[in-house]
Image: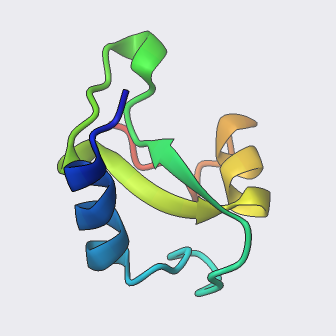
Amino acid sequence: MISKKILCQVWERDRGLCPAWGTGDNLHLHHVKFKSRGGKDTLENLVLLCAVHHRACHNGDPKLCWED
């Protein structure tokens, strides 16, 4: 479970906006390195994405997936 402290830090860093479109609507917290691949609940591994871009990332859109 992601701590409230980390959640607040992500929102502050990302300014409550999806970096792909700059929208603040229907935001999801996304793990850059998926939890299923060992990703952690850290500020460095979390980003806010709108629902459209979150879905695209999980569907493999290389423009939205930052994992190495």
Residue furthest to the front in view is: 4
Where is residue 6 shown, x and y percent of the image? 23, 51
The residue located at (67%, 51%) in the rendering is 54
Tally of marks:
0
Nearer to us in this view, 22 or 5: 5
Where is residue 2 shown, x and y percent of the image? 34, 36
In the depicted structure, whether residue 29 falls above or below residue 38: below
In the depicted structure, whether residue 13 falls above or below residue 65: below
The residue located at (65%, 85%) in the rendering is 23
Say which quadrant the N terminus sits in: top left
Where is residue 62 shown, x and y percent of the image? 59, 49
In the drawing, does residue 4 fall left or right of residue 26? left
The residue located at (38%, 84%) in the rendering is 15
In the drawing, does residue 53 fall left or right of residue 10? right
Nearer to us in this view, 20 or 6: 6
**Coloured how?**
rainbow
The residue located at (62%, 82%) in the rendering is 24
In the drawing, does residue 35 fall left or right of residue 4? right
Q: Residue 31's quadrant in the figure?
A: top left
In the depicted structure, whether residue 19 falls above or below residue 5: below
Q: Residue 12's quadrant in the figure?
A: bottom left
In the drawing, does residue 56 fall left or right of residue 13? right
Say which quadrant the C terminus sits in: top left
